[in-house]
Image: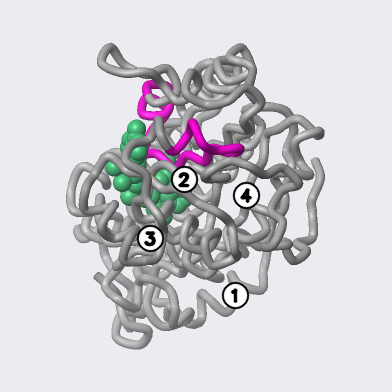
Amino acid sequence: MTETTPTPADPADPSAESGRASRIAFLGLGHMGLPMAANLVAAGYDVAGFDVVPAALDAARAAGIPVADDAVTAASGARIVITMFPSGAHLLRAYRGEEDGPGLLAAAEPGTLFLDCSTITVEESREAAEAALSAGHRSADAPVSGGVVGAEAGTLTFMVGADEADLPQLMPLLEVMGRKIVHCGAHGAGQAAKICNNMILGASMIVSSEAFVLGEKLGLTHQALFDVISTASGQCWSVTTNCPVPGPVPTSPANRDYRPGFAGALMAKDLGLALAALESTGVAAEIGPAAAAIYQRYAAGEGATRDFSGIITDIRDASAGGSAADGAASGDAGVGG
Ligand code: NAD
């Protein structure tokens, strides 16, 4: 695994190659894709964006991103095709085309670098890479963490699965959109790393929330418990940065009634991908599947659009019948949600 320290990209010469109408096709201009593409435009890259939703195209134009008439037109003029789609099914369909039209792989000139930043299964990612390579192109997966805030600020973390030979072309682009880029290995390795990380994140948020509710029952203030956990062996991002109770970390979503942040629907999706990988590899996991089931339930209700740390309210509600110790924490530290 290789970690790189970002160096400033050279906007005047994103690549040594030239002579194409649009050097980067950016497809999928949603919550994440739009600010990522806008950062490339701001850095001087020649971008042609496209999204199947007209409102997304309007928003892209308003953000100064040039848009193409359709995805195939954008890809046919590009050296690099970046995708930021909801799922692997969207990606494979776009690559291969449908009955009524050709796909991106057929439209692009041979040797085009297909860079997928969506979060999809490892299998879909490898399938997409194989399809791109068999069509005479190059391929990389680079899912992200950091959310919309990181996409806007250009501070995403990219987990990259790619051939070493393609890194020199990839890095300057990724460094515009992100702050930390980790080359995890060959095709699909970026998705694998993302899924493993988010399985830890989902499980750690659940158990941290359980600990805070237990602390409430035992009469601990949120602040006292935070002060211990954040400097003791229970320390984790779910407590120190995204603390599920309001107060100890003023920027955590708990302080704004669990407005995301990272929505429950996205956590449920990522844990679903982890579950598929656990099953296909035969790993004898118990916590990961339990976390996936808990977040599927959470995302089936209003948790879909709330931050994933709002799971604490479900845990607290389900614990309402138990006895609380005298002087429980809620009055002191403020129980959210
Ligand atoms: P989104 O739904 O807002 O955006 C996806 C866009 O892709 C949509 O606008 C959709 O119309 C477009 N699209 C679908 N098929 C297309 C096609 N064939 N051609 C052109 N456009 C097409 O989703 P998002 O929140 O931007 O997330 C994108 C990806 O990033 C997902 O895989 C998600 O899991 C991942 N991700 C999201 C976050 C987050 O905080 N939102 C964080 C990390 C990773």
Nearest to N terminus: mark 4 or mark 3: 4
Q: Is residue 211 left or right of residue 268?
A: right
Residue 151 vertical position relative to residue 137 in the rendered view, above or below? below
Nearest to N terminus: mark 3 or mark 2: 2
Instruction: Tell whether position 80 is magenta.
Output: yes
Instruction: From the image, tell me which residue sits under label 3.
Output: 309
Residue 76 vertical position relative to residue 126 in the rendered view, above or below? below
Q: Residues within 10 Å of mark 4 (few under 14, many from 20)?
A: many
Secondary-structure class at tag 1: helix
Secondary-structure class at tag 2: strand
Instruction: From the image, tell me which residue sits under label 2.
Output: 26
Q: Residues within 10 Å of mark 3 (few under 14, many from 20)?
A: many
Task: Give the amino acid at mark 4.
Answer: Phe
Nearest to N terminus: mark 1 or mark 3: 1
Mark 4 to mark 3 CA distance (whole Å)? 23 Å
Quarter of the picture for ligand 1?
top left
Asked if the beta carbon under badge 2 is closer than 8 A to the nearest atom of ligand 1, the reply is: no
